[in-house]
Amino acid sequence: MTDPALLARVRAEVAAGIDPAGLLAAYAEPARRVLLRERVRVAARVPVAESELDAMCAELFGFGPLQPLLDDPEVTDVLVNGPRDIFCERSGRLERLDVAFRGTDDVAELAHRIAGSVGRELTLERPFVDARMRDGSRANAVIAPIGGPSLSIRKFNRLSIPLRGPAPSWVASGLHDDAAALLEECVRGRASILVSGATGSGKSTLLRSLAAAIPDDERLVVIEDTNELVLPHSHVVHLECVPAREGTGIGIADLVANALRMRPDRILVGEVRTPREASALLEALSTGHEGSLTTIHAGSAAGAIDRLELLLARAGELGATAIARHVAQGIDVLVHVVRDHGGTRSVREIAAVEDSGVVALWRAGDGTVRMPVRLRQRLG
């Protein structure tokens, strides 16, 4: 463990000149990390082992003992229940780690650093924060009096895998090849697709896979909380939310409304979570912007429609009959993804929204892919 006196001296000479809110962002940039590392080496004024130098830099500027986990490409989630109670998900499996903070004060300090990095504060009145880091990673921090201090960090994932072909692909994970071909046909045919699943099930990854089938001569406007959907496409415009500060902010619904003025061929929304977002998306779909892709939290394909209708009902703009009609006109295909106990992500079911309701097209383990009347007509 680093000598506290040495760490305090180096902090005074190096870290004191950096805005505390910018520490994590500075350390996340490779070039600045190298520079800061050399400044720490010089400020130490005594020989320091490379491993100790890394630990000092992580504590001064980064995520402390969690930094090696965040630098590990196989780690997707880091969970801190207490200073010596730390877990991570690595390659799809949750494991307890032999990693520790010195005490609860260090966990709380990191929680405050995370909040500060996005211009927020943890206070007694607001003892929790959901922060989207500059690299796209998401961190949730909780302090007393409601609990903790505890941290939940989901790393930004740029994983992109094809629908078809050898592993890694969705077909290799259990999607029938004919079902994958149908999804490609639906994307090319400008069907609007809603991807559902639980947190960490692979919704965004599948969205990237589906977007690969969009023709190159189309203009895509991608709307997200944080820019995560790095798409294999030549004409993409990204719009990113601005977190609310002092009562102001720019959300998904605001960006969907603006996207309509940007001559989009397709609008891709990272995730629909609020009544206003659901209303804005369906409004865009009803004004002729077909072929949109988005995700939603739900437990099944049919549950995704129920969730969307519930959000629209909470918006209070339409009655139940109008909501059902609005959704049926706007959404063509539903795809539900899951993650099993071994960490493997796969497509569980594909369904279509027909005049009669939700109709199953394919389910995991089924060798038959169905094509209902409305979807067949929709695809020409």
Image (spheres, rainbow, N blue to C red):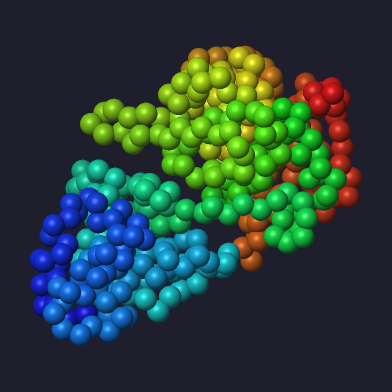
User: Is 268 displayed left or right of 353 in the figure?
Assistant: left
Q: Position of residue 344 (x, y in %)?
A: 65, 61
Instruction: Note whether 6 is above or below 158 in the view shown.
Output: below
Q: Quadrant of the C terminus?
A: top right
In this view of the protein, which residue sits in the foreground, 370 or 74?
74
Q: Position of residue 177 (x, y in %)?
A: 83, 49
Q: Quadrant of the N terminus?
A: bottom left
Q: Position of residue 157 (x, y in %)?
A: 52, 54
Instruction: Note whether 123 is above or below 64 in the view shown.
Output: above
> Can you tell which quarter of the image residue 93 is in?
bottom right
Residue 281 visible, this orientation: yes
Residue at image location 27% in from the left, 84% down from the top: 49
User: Is 289 displayed left or right of 278 in the figure?
Assistant: right
User: Is 326 displayed left or right of 148 in the figure?
Assistant: right
Residue at image location 47% in from the left, 53% down from the top: 156
In this view of the protein, which residue sits in the foreground, 138 or 310?
138
Instruction: Note whether 283 is above or below 197 in the view shown.
Output: above
Instruction: Note whether 54 is above or below 312 in the view shown.
Output: below
Residue at image location 26% in from the left, 34% down from the top: 245
Q: How many marks?
A: 0
In this view of the protein, which residue sits in the foreground, 314 or 377?
377
Residue at image location 89% in from the left, 45% down from the top: 368
Residue 203 visible, this orientation: no
Q: Position of residue 23 (x, y in %)?
A: 25, 56
Pick out the residue farthest to the right: 368
In this view of the protein, which residue sits in the foreground, 30 or 360?
30
